[in-house]
Amino acid sequence: MLISTSRKPSQKTRKFCKTLARTTGSTSVNRGKMNMRELLLKALEVDEINLAIVNEIKGNPSKITFYSNKGEVLLVLLISISMDNNEKLNIAPSQLKIVSSFDRLNVLSDILDIELVDRAEDNFIIISQDENLVAKINFVNKFGEKLNFQINVKKILEAAHD
């Protein structure tokens, strides 16, 4: 997946995009003046199937819109994040799996091209429901340690239709 930002992103949003790309084995690019068509072409150029654009409010990542390489909206998540800027990730993206207890976000397995499994000991993304949010997306490294990198899903606006 190619991950990019809205125009003129804050440092925090750029850092989030780079961290998300590193943890998922995706490619992150600075958007600059690229329009949607140019971003989709860039995704094809770097052999990425899907595109994610991260928007922000007041300098903080607030929305991720996932697109197919044809420009179709696959999923829109309203989010907030928490992350430790100095944390060593220790994730091997090529071995990453998804463990989900929240069916509405299982589509992320297809979007990110990461296998959905029932359980994993290490190196996985865990998607769970949360009483204060719609869901939480956490990352567990290759040592089985939960990272301080978390995506809080506040609302799901649109999901892929099969």
Image (cartoon, rainbow, N blue to C red):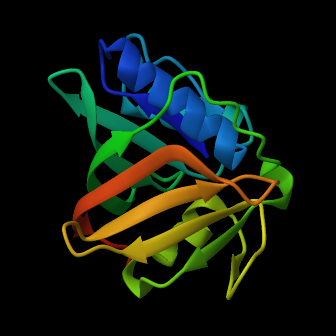
Q: Report the residue at 19% width, 68% height from top.
A: 132
Q: Report the residue at 38% width, 33% height from top.
A: 36
Give whichever of 131, 6 is nearer the camera.
131
- Quadrant, the C terminus: bottom left
45 lies above or below 25: above
When asked about the image quadrant of residue 13, the answer is top left
Give whichever of 32, 81 is nearer the camera.
81
Q: Report the residue at 81% width, 54% height from top.
A: 143
Q: In the rendering, at what x and y percent does residue 27 appear?
A: 66, 34
Give whichever of 138, 111 is nearer the camera.
138
Q: Report the residue at 48% width, 85% height from top.
A: 101
Looking at this view, name the residue that lies furthest to the left: 58
When asked about the image quadrant of residue 113, the answer is bottom right
47 lies above or below 18: below
When asked about the image quadrant of residue 82, the answer is top left
Q: In the rendering, at what x and y percent does residue 125 appear?
A: 61, 63
81 lies above or below 122: above
- Please give left or right for residue 34 compared with residue 157 in the image: right
Q: In the rendering, at what x and y percent does residue 159 appear?
A: 33, 72
100 lies above or below 22: below
- Please give left or right for residue 77 compared with residue 43 in the image: left
